[in-house]
Image (cartoon, coloured by chain):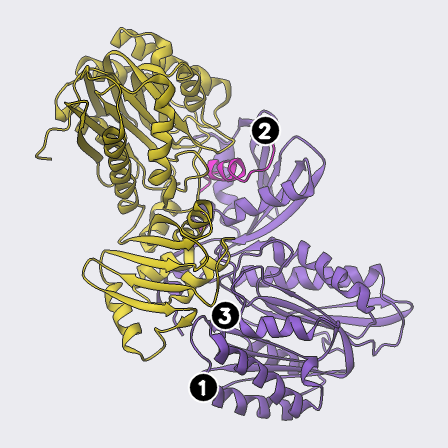
Chain colours: A yellow, B purple
Amino acid sequence: MTDEISVPGFRVGGKRGKKYGLAIVASDVPANCSVMATSNKIRASPVELSLKHARDNVAQGVVISSGNANAFTGEQGERDARRMCELASESLGVDSEDVIVNSTGIIGQNLEMSEIEELIDGVAENLQSNDSGINDAADAMRTTDSFEKIASRNAVVNGENVRVTGFAKGAGMIAPDLLHATMIAVILTDTQVPKDKIDDALRAAVDLSFNMINVDGDTSTNDMVVLLANGTAGNGEAGSSFQTALNAVCLDLARLIVKDGEGATKLFEVEIHGAVSSEDARRAAKSVVRSTLVKTAVFGENPNWGRVVAAIGYSGAEFDKSRLSLRLSDEKEGVVLVEDGVGVALKGTVEIKKAGEILKSSEVRFTADLGVGDFTATAIGCDLGYNYVKVNAEYTT
Amino acid sequence: MTDEISVPGFRVGGKRGKKYGLAIVASDVPANCSVMATSNKIRASPVELSLKHARDNVAQGVVISSGNANAFTGEQGERDARRMCELASESLGVDSEDVIVNSTGIIGQNLEMSEIEELIDGVAENLQSNDSGINDAADAMRTTDSFEKIASRNAVVNGENVRVTGFAKGAGMIAPDLLHATMIAVILTDTQVPKDKIDDALRAAVDLSFNMINVDGDTSTNDMVVLLANGTAGNGEAGSSFQTALNAVCLDLARLIVKDGEGATKLFEVEIHGAVSSEDARRAAKSVVRSTLVKTAVFGENPNWGRVVAAIGYSGAEFDKSRLSLRLSDEKEGVVLVEDGVGVALKGTVEIKKAGEILKSSEVRFTADLGVGDFTATAIGCDLGYNYVKVNAEYTT
């Protein structure tokens, strides 16, 4: 990264140990905070604890471990999550109830705490206010992730420059649901976002980003997005320019997660127009990015667009079959597959040939018009190939 | 097959041509009929036409082609479906409106009718009342299916021996939904099932079988189950022994479809107990058999049971986390993975080792108790391995 990404008033660090990795964030002052958590009914102990700690919309520290999700681990899991908060609290000199905690990795196995304890001590001693702290934290959170996921934007809020920086982990067990996010992302900003508005700000951003991605259709037990706004910029209440920056950071991170989907070779977007409601547009878009058959067709660069139409068909969204249209495009060019309910890219046509060529791009977009309204939505998915199977047939630890 | 499977009063045949395959069933007399069709809003033209033809619960012929689904093919598709009924009607000497028609294969491409027309003539001329006709029909319906799917049972209805025989196709785009079936199956019986009861009889069987299977989560545009009861046995109204036989035939066919899931190497069942309602039990069971992560774990013989728990967690079904239990078993032995909400098969235990051994079997069963009620359900899925990707990345025609 060439541009500065660190956020004033935050110190960050991370380290990978033998079995686990660990990341810590500390704010110089108590920050306003929002936590969005998975809708899975089996929520990991640390997620439950974080939701309690964020109930007052204030937090000052974040501690995240990778290698074991501490999910479905009963009372031992609760004790371990509390212990992680306590250790971070002592190391950072902040209130234990102001620490947000989470873990990621295998479900149903107890954390071995001795290494976690060592890591918390080690990381807390070396927090940095520069960019490398954020890089270390993003690296330490990785499990099957093949690269670090960091995004940053500047915004001008009431005349002051402020920064919004997020880092995330996520590559598998990715299928957001409802109003909740389903991966782990930490977003820091030095602007001031009032306690009574911070949940709405984060929810709006999450709904346009993390909640519209799909790697494998499985909604995790641990996924969480946390936003800390410490007001260090001293510039008063954040407005629309902050929301724009927050949306952009969340969308960048969401795209990075999809790009790094387990075994993924291609990212594809599905843009729905002409829906009767926003919910319907989202439903149709998400149905297509979830479809295993569409995913494997994209992997195979196989212009079998009937699978896209079928996935819209079973999504539950309303549409007018006789007005349905579908296009495929990459950055350079596009081709009509269906127009007014009639297939254009038939066997042997130039359109089907062109569709096959466009599918060779690493990023493609299906654009469908449902022909029944004015609402729109975009979902983001990745292909499913041999490496997804390899990663998930063999991944246990 | 050693036992006789042909059904009195029915003649059946099938043939594979160059691009397409074609199967025909003819009843000697008009039969009472029930058709259950996919819930996908994009229903193929032949499915729409068949639902019209079955509105009076009477049919006398069935014609099914493979190689092209005739789905999302507009007016041309409607004409082609009608033409298939007319040709079968002429060849069989039955009313065109008493012909049930369907197709299976790629979506969005027009049928090339010349071969279909030849096939209808050829097959209709050689219908057989013996077993080989049924074998030929099951073979002709195949697309990515690697074997024929046939099931048969005898029942005693009012003192008379009657037979229920079904044949089916299906290997991919398999994910049943709601009250509808999502593959193609034809079931024939010589007992009498009254018109006003035949839909209920088929629905009951479909709900326990085809609607509980999942290969890839994609609900097809073409899937259909048709039951023809021609009353040839002359034994009066069918009762519970017929229903038992019908349920068994549907379940056999459903299991055969899963066993032949594209690229599948293992079948796994998920049996849910202790749910607050039948719907909830079904929801939980279906969520697990749909999970890509569970499917890949089963493929990898990887006892990562946390993925099963997570899929129950996001299913929407009610459960008591502190009473949840989970077992894994094959035909010979079983092992407890979770008991009263506590993981038993932890790293390094004999249980986790045994779970890995059981997963080497070609058929395994997860049995979960949700701990909140008395309802139960069983769903059936298959693993997802490299060959699923291969089949679906390359399959266009």
| Residue at horizontal 55 percent and vertical 76 percent from the top | B141
Q: Is residue B143 visible?
A: no
Which residue position is annotated with label 3?
A: B146
The amino acid sitting under disc 3 is Ser
- Give percent across and percent down for residue A106: 40, 33
Asked if marks 2 and 1 fall on the same chain, the answer is yes
| Disc on the earlier residue, 1 or 3 | 1
Q: Nearer the viewer, residue A20 or B158?
A: B158
Q: Along the polypeptide, which appears first: circle 2 or circle 3? A: 3
Left or right: A301 as drawn, with respect to B271: left
Does B163 appear above or below B176?
A: below
**Would you name the residue on which mark 1 appears?**
B18
- Residue stretch in magenta: B298-320
Q: Which residue is mark 2?
A: B339
* Viewer-closest of B87 and B77: B77
* Secondary structure at numbered mark 1: loop
Please state the horizontal and vertical placement of residue A70, each as a whole percent of the image: 41, 25
In three-dimensional space, the C-alpha distance between marks 2 and 3, rounded to whole angstroms, equals 39 Å
Letter of the chain that mark 2 sits on in the rendering: B
Closer to us: mark 1 or mark 3? 1
